[in-house]
Amino acid sequence: TREIAAACNIERGGLHYHFNKKQDILFELYRQFYSFMYDSIIDQFSDEDEAVLIIISNMLLYRILLTHTSLSRMMVSVMRNRDLTKAKITETSRVLENKTLQVGYPQIRFALSIAIGAEVELILQLTEGEIDLSLDELARWVSGLALTALGYSSADVDRYYHRALECVEMFDVKAFAETMEQNVTWFQQSDIQ
């Protein structure tokens, strides 16, 4: 925290005024990234079904965060900390409730608790080389768990997964990176290009 405070040109106590724990800083970085990414998805694919948007968000999250060293470390650090995982469930539930899903917060939170619990274990096993799974397959399994818990059939999940694959190929990563760089001081386009 001393180095972070120095880089921000503030006193260490000032940093702790805004963030109680070091983990809070890490989660704020993740929260900013996820929120901007989801806004970008909504901007580009607002006509898509909410289930497709969930799958797209997971695909892009994994494709961007897990393929770039510094961002991957952030994601794995979030996954290794139970408090941060709980915060990820809460924040993701809030974002989805406010932007797309027609179901209530408790149902969204329940579905995401199941999916993110599996996501944590799968990402840790994947990054440690214990399983061989593509990032899109990871998104398919995690999203499928959430959507099934929300009442979707496996046939629906398959159909939405294939549509999400098409959308992800059209996603404007450069525009997303530019928006992030303009609005989030810690982010640099070189992080994802």
Image (cartoon, rainbow, N blue to C red):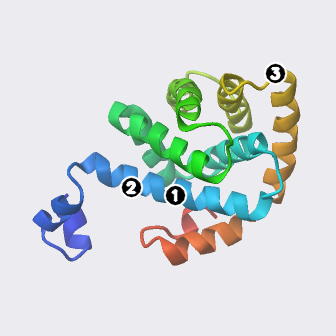
Residue position for label 1? 33
* Label 1, label 2: how far apart the Cα atoms are: 9 Å
Residue type at tag 3: Ser
Residue type at tag 2: Glu
Measured along the vertical axis of the image, is residue 171 above or below residue 125?
below
* The N terminus, quarter of image: bottom left
The percent coordinates of residue 67 (x first, y second) are 60, 48
The percent coordinates of residue 157 (x first, y second) are 81, 29
The answer, for residue 77, to whether it is visible in the render is yes
Measured along the vertical axis of the image, is residue 70 above or below residue 186?
above
Measured along the vertical axis of the image, is residue 110 above or below residue 170?
above
Question: How many numbered tags mark residues here?
Answer: 3
Out of 18 and 181, give the one closest to the viewer: 18
Left or right: 163 with respect to 145? right
Mark nearer the N terminus (1 vs 2): 2
Out of 160 and 126, give the one closest to the viewer: 160
Residue visible at 62% across and 68% down in the picture: 177
Residue visible at 71% across and 23% down in the picture: 148
* The C terminus, quarter of image: bottom right
